[in-house]
Amino acid sequence: MNATARVLPFPGPGGTAAVLTGLGAWVPPRVLSNAEIASRLDTSDEWIRARTGIHQRHIVDPGMSTSDLAVEAGQRALKSADTDRVDALVLATTTPDRPCPATAPDVAYRMGLERCAAYDVNAVCTGFLYGLASGAGLIAAGVAEQVLVIGADTFSTILDPDCRNTAAIFGDGAGAVVLRAGSAHEPGALGPFDLGSDGRDADLIMVPSGGSRQRSTVTPAPAGSEYFTMAGKAVFRKAIFQMAGSAQAVLRKAGIGLHDVDRFVIHQANVRIINGVADMLGVPVGRFVRNIDRFGNTAAASVPLALTSATESGELRAGQRVLLGAFGGGLTWGSTVLRWPDIEAM
Ligand code: UT7
């Protein structure tokens, strides 16, 4: 059975929906231009712009880690929601501060959210969508009334400095939303969700060592195996196919059509992937939010960062129907829809 074929009831049996009430994002100040990458690798500003749509990205300086970005974005989202209390913090990341323990409890502690439930979710670039579904699930199950969902990644810390295939694409950043228990009819109510995975292609996007398969206590890890690797061409086609399929699946569940969606906010992996999804769906690309030129691919931060950019610019306005979608390592993909609430992004 296809991983995305099962229709889950939404909202939960109790009828409680998760409503988005706050949004914030943060990127580290250091800007890395294409020209700077081209000065040390066999690439060019023209190639990167033409093949990816990326003009620059932000990266952390040594000493700054994923939790630092997550705290900044989380604080902004709480301010946007005008609250200082949550029952749970879900951190979507593939670049935790350490392999163990999870980074979320440290983020919660540093934000003054002591004693709240806090855990990490790893679905690579789909992490924020999985995090949203996880937060919405906590609310639907009555486990939490208010949840902070953060997507934060520092891929610059795991890239091979000599690999032009990945160095040009990824940037660092964080974005966050606050969810609270409410009704499915309110603006900001999330759902339904479509989530899926295909572990047959786990090797297409990976960090080979550092886990239990490559045991550092038995065999020293091969040189370079701690770096992130991606089979770009294979991933490119699958990203378009799965994000378009997931968008159609979630709209079927919601009982609405593509023409009912005012804005598509999907993972900013490559501007040609966004164009490809628009083409495959037959939707004008002007309805797709894009900020990849300024930030590159920020993995789990990509969707909330794009939401923040689009809210600040006025491209995303209260009352519009928005489809969120992502695709990433695992392989994983996911989508949800909501009516955009009247909020100020921070
Ligand atoms: O976030 C998770 C999902 N991630 C993605 O969805 C990323 C998906 N993949 C991509 O965005 C694209 O595949 C890339 C941007 C990674 C590569 O672009 P492409 O147009 O698919 O290039 P390609 O892989 O087909 O490579 C074409 C050529 C190759 O050279 P040869 O073998 O034809 O001589 C590459 O080595 O382009 C070369 N190339 C580069 N050249 C200059 C790859 N990266 C670069 C570079 N600068 N940075």
Image: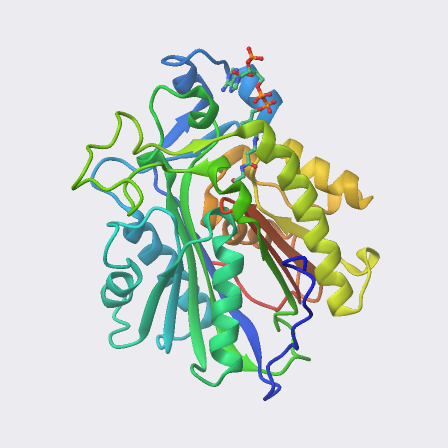
Q: Residue furthest bottom?
A: 14
Ligand 1 picture quarter = top right
Q: Is residue 262 visible?
A: no
Q: Is residue 136 above or below residue 245?
A: below
Q: Quadrant of the C terminus?
A: bottom left
Position of 66 with respect to 248 (left or right) is: left
Residue displayed at 68% across by 60% down: 1
Residue 298 location (% of width, % of height)? 46, 42
Q: Is residue 341 visible?
A: yes
Residue displayed at 62% across by 53% down: 325
Residue displayed at 38% across by 48% down: 94
Residue 202 location (% of width, % of height)? 49, 42
Q: Residue furthest left?
A: 217
Position of 165 with respect to 67 (left or right) is: right
Residue 7 location (% of width, % of height)? 69, 70
Q: Is residue 305 above or below residue 233?
A: below
Displayed quadrant of residue 10? bottom right
Residue displayed at 61% across by 21% down: 50
| Pick the front one: 35 or 124 | 124
Position of 61 with respect to 299 (left or right) is: left
Q: Residue furthest front?
A: 218
Residue 56 location (% of width, % of height)? 47, 29
